[in-house]
Image: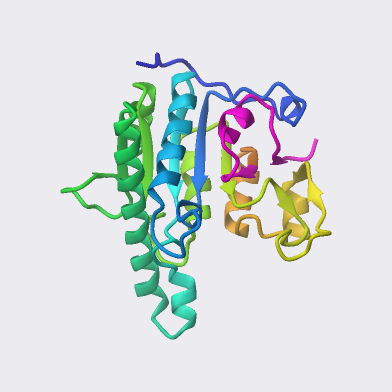
Amino acid sequence: MVKAVPLERTDPDDIGPAGGFSPRRVLLKLSGEGLMGAQGYGLDMDVVRRLAREIKAVHEAGKELCLVIGGGNIFRGLSTAAQGMDRTSADHMGMLATVMNALAVQNFLEKEGVPTRVQSAIPMASICEPYIRRRAIRHMEKGRVVIFAAGTGNPFFTTDTAAALRAVEMNCDALLKATQVDGVYDADPKLVPTANRYDSLTFGDVLRQDLRVMDTSAIALARDNGIPILVFSLQQPGALAEVLRGAGRYTIIREEI
């Protein structure tokens, strides 16, 4: 069991690829697409199993962890709405997809011996807990990993915004966004081989350059509450533990120094 200790927000000046970044409590944002592996749809169980083992390693190192998982591997509300479906209904369906992903990740974490709780912003009492802020904090203090499902519970808000909101509510020291690439680029490096990669950005840089690593609501929430965002590759084994040691390859987005 992880002993509860008072949290102190890390000084932004000490965070960076060469800095001594050692957060106590973090929120990990996983994309739904990252759980597909090489498949075109659904869950790649080998990928989910690997992620569970990496989360376990970080958990055993004494970190307090919470997660937000997207649902794009099952259903994307915005793209479906663009094809003619009502946006509110499409977004609600996307929220249900995130619950399915949360239950899958919970299953693999508990197989690895990691105590886990799923909390949904849309009440589903028979399969998971409702989102209750104080209960979620208490779970983490007791050494449990908490997975927040169903986004914010409202349409028109992405899971990126949900991740930033929960990071603020949980008093997290950082928000870690696991993506398909090893940081933030000025263009898609898979389509533009000459795309420029950034080691460090300010929140203002992201908004001014419209880099779209996360939506503007998420960036604004993190900026206004002083929570740094670290972007790294979901595909690189061991990257999560490396980032939390202040090593590895990632881009940090933070307040202007």
Quarter of the picture holding the N terminus:
top left
Give residue 57's position: percent from left, percent from top: 47, 25
Above or below — where is 41 with respect to 163? below
Q: Which residues are magenta?
A: 231-257
* Residue for point 76% across, 51% down: 204
Residue 238 among those drawn in magenta: yes
Q: Quadrant of residue 222?
A: top right
* Residue for point 57% across, 28% down: 241
* Residue for point 36% across, 38% down: 133
Residue 142 among those drawn in magenta: no
Whether residue 131 is visible here, answered yes or no, is: no
Quarter of the picture holding the C terminus:
top right
Give residue 201's position: percent from left, percent from top: 77, 45
Q: Is 112 placed left or right of 239 in the picture?
A: left
Above or below — where is 114 with respect to 201? above
Give residue 218's position: percent from left, percent from top: 58, 53
Whether residue 21 is visible here, answered yes or no, is: yes
Above or below — where is 181 with respect to 24? below
- Residue lying farthest to the left in this orientation: 126
Q: Of 148 and 216, which appears nearest the observer?
A: 148
